[in-house]
């Protein structure tokens, strides 16, 4: 049985959208307070400094130079990862999350 076009369109609009899959991002990791100071030399930023600047939040620098800020949950995960790490500088991270403009809704992250 064929549905009238108006009914088919209404059903398609009312149907829930399939959940979007999260993207994976890899790159240098830095706190937002030190971002401008370390532009172009993020690899020299230290773990100790990042832990001192935790209140500003964190993010990842993409290969094209764009910086994506973490959401609140991502900031908590990043702080935990920093505290557990023994790596002193050249902090790199792999993040899985949903990007909206310049912010990442972080689902998981791993400090390398």
Image (spheres, rainbow, N blue to C red):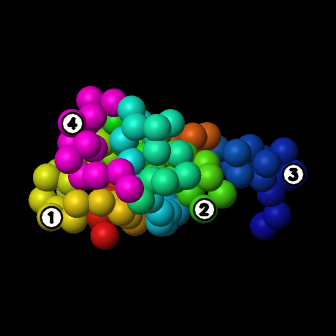
Contact flag, marks 1 and 4 (Cβ < 8 Å): no
Say the numbered circle drawn on residue 23. Answer: none
Picture coordinates of residue 30, whole percent (x, y):
39, 48
Residue drawn at x 64%, y 44% as measured from the top left: 14
Find disc 4 in the rendering and name its residue: 52
Residue at 79% from the left image edge and 48% from the top image edge:
9
Nearer-N-terminus badge (2/4): 4
Stretch in magenta: 44-56
Q: In this orientation, which residue lies closer to the viewer: 105 or 30?
A: 30
Q: Disc 1 marks which residue?
A: 86
Rendering coords of residue 33 (x, y %): 39, 32
- Give the mark toward the camera: 3 or 2: 2
C-alpha distance separating marks 4 and 3: 60 Å
For the residue carrying disc 4, how many other residues have a C-alpha within 10 Å: few (<14), some (14-19), or many (20+)? few
Most distant residue in the bottom direction: 112
Q: Is residue 8 left or right of residue 95?
A: right
Q: Nearer the viewer, residue 76 or 90?
A: 90
Q: Quadrant of the N terminus?
A: bottom right
């Amino acid at each position: 049985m064929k549905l009238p076009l108006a009914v088919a369109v209404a059903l398609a609009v009312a149907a829930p959208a399939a959940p979007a899959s999260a993207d994976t991002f890899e790159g240098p990791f830095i706190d937002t307070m030190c971002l401008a100071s370390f532009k172009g030399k993020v690899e020299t930023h230290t773990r100790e400094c990042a832990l001192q600047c935790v209140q500003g939040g964190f993010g990842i620098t993409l290969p094209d130079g764009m910086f994506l800020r973490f959401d609140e949950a991502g900031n908590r995960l990043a702080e935990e990862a920093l505290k557990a790490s023994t790596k002193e500088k050249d902090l790199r991270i792999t993040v899985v999350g949903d990007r909206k403009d310049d912010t990442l809704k972080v689902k998981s992250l791993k400090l390398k």
